[in-house]
Image (tube, rainbow, N blue to C red):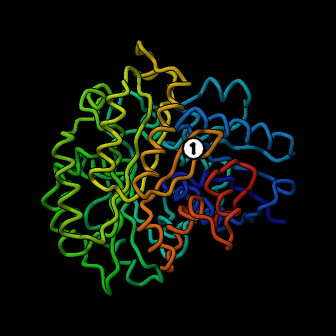
């Protein structure tokens, strides 16, 4: 009888979700059965997120929860690198880091090796999204980030490989292609190529469909702006997610995120002007060390002035070992909460819909106009995100539970 494997996947991270989708295919090709029920599994693979301390806590709680079963437990994802000591304090079993996924072969590689399995392009967001991972790893050195330790050095696919995968989109039933990577704008630095050259090679998407660019650092958006603007003018781009993290030049420098905020504001506004249907998404960190009330207002002003379509707010989470965690003048937790609540009030006053996750204090927001349009469209990703902030009668609680990702539900990767 075939052994059974349950994969518990963190749905907040599309990159690790793609890893587990590929692992699911690999396991089946090697004769294993994927199951949802942890109680009957012979192996449980837990994908962990160490993005902020709250996601680490949830991952550790999840690991503690499944330890009661007889299955062999394997922990993968980012926590083995972002919070290894915390992990060791509760778990002494098998750990496989993001940068050493080939070690799954030592356990499951009966007939096929993981490196020989093609990337899986469909996402849990829904079959309407076709995701192409163009690179792995991150060359940045942001002062607050521990995730970079977990994703490792930059490794880019050749341009021709990326283009061939993107072209497969036209043979799928998907509506949109997602260009993805741990730091997508750094694409090609290791192979003598560039994100700009990749964008120029991006096949014109047929029938009005468009590409979504995920995790585009503002400095790369500015560096390759001409190519991005050209793609936007041709209506090739449907969405760009570029995390500003702060509207304050001083805070940006402390974060070691090199970007001219005035230039970035002009770029956002011009992109929206030449391509009104383009969706701009971002992330903002609230309460970074030494941040003042005035600098918080700069972040709010940037979002409102550029009419960012949707985004996330995160309370600063000091990750052990990072430069930011050791900085003096850490902002008091109560002040962080006060500031994020103030940000929410300003968003609501300017026609944004907002959902706040009480446990982590993370916030997702969306311009009401964009949210309403997404409701009218047959668009799985937007429904996934926006039903959490704009309740309706169809699956609100289920979608909200997925977004919160409490760790109480196991997901079998398709």
In this view of the protein, which residue sits in the foreground, 124 or 222? 222
In this view of the protein, which residue sits in the foreground, 352 or 72? 352
Residue at left offset 47%, top offset 64%: 119
- Whole-percent x, y for residue 15 in the image: 48, 54
Residue at left offset 43%, top offset 49%: 347
Q: Sort mark 1 into few (<14), some (14-19) or many (20+) by Cα contacts within 10 Å.
A: many
Q: Residue furthest bottom?
A: 207
Q: Residue furthest front?
A: 349
- Whole-percent x, y for residue 124 in the image: 58, 66
In this view of the protein, which residue sits in the foreground, 205 or 68? 205
In this view of the protein, which residue sits in the foreground, 222 or 378? 378
- Whole-percent x, y for residue 187 in the image: 28, 52
Residue at left offset 39%, top offset 77%: 169
Q: Residue furthest left?
A: 226
Image quarter of residue 161: bottom left
* Quadrant assignment for the N terminus: bottom right
Residue corresponding to mark 1: 77
| Above or below 155: residue 232 | below
Position of residue 385 in the picture relative to residue 221 (left or right): right
Residue at left offset 21%, top offset 47%: 264
- Asked which secondary structure carries label 1, the reply is strand
- Whole-percent x, y for residue 368 in the image: 45, 64
| Above or below 232: residue 334 | above
């Amino acid at each position: 009888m075939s052994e059974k494997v349950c994969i518990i996947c963190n749905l907040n991270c599309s990159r690790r979700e793609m890893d587990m989708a590929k692992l699911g295919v690999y396991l089946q090709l090697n004769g294993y059965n994927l199951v949802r029920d942890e109680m009957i599994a012979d192996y449980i693979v837990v994908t962990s997120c160490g993005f902020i301390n709250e996601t680490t806590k949830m991952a550790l709680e999840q690991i503690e929860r499944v330890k009661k079963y007889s299955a062999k437990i394997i922990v993968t994802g980012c926590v083995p690198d972002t919070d290894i000591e915390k992990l060791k304090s509760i778990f002494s079993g098998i750990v496989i880091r993001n940068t050493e996924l080939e070690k799954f072969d030592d356990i499951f590689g009966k007939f096929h090796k993981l490196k020989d399995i093609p990337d899986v392009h469909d996402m849990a967001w829904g079959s309407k999204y076709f995701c192409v991972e163009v690179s792995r790893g991150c060359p940045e050195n942001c002062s607050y980030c521990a995730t970079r330790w977990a994703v490792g050095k930059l490794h880019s696919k050749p341009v021709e490989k990326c283009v061939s995968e993107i072209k497969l989109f036209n043979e799928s039933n998907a509506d949109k292609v997602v260009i993805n990577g741990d730091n997508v704008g750094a694409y090609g630095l290791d192979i003598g190529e560039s994100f700009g050259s990749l964008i120029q090679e991006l096949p014109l998407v047929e029938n009005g469909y468009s590409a979504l660019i995920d995790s585009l650092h503002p400095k790369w958006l500015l560096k390759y702006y001409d190519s991005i603007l050209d793609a936007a003018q041709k209506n090739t781009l449907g969405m760009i997610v570029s995390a500003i993290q702060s509207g304050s030049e001083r805070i940006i420098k402390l974060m070691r995120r090199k970007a001219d905020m005035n230039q970035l504001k002009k770029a956002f506004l011009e992109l929206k002007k030449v391509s009104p249907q383009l969706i701009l998404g971002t992330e903002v960190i609230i309460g970074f060390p030494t941040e003042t009330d005035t600098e918080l207002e700069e972040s709010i002003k940037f979002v409102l002035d550029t009419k960012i379509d949707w985004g996330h707010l995160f309370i600063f989470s000091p990750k052990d070992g990072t430069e930011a965690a050791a900085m003096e003048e850490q902002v008091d937790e109560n002040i962080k909460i006060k500031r994020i609540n103030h940000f929410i009030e300003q968003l609501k006053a300017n026609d944004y819909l907002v959902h706040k996750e009480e446990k982590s204090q993370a916030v997702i927001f969306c311009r009401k106009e964009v949210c309403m349009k997404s409701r009218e469209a047959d668009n799985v990703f937007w429904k996934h995100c926006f039903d959490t902030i704009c309740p309706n009668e169809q699956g609100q609680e289920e979608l909200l539970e997925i977004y919160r990702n409490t760790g109480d539900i196991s997901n079998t990767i398709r």
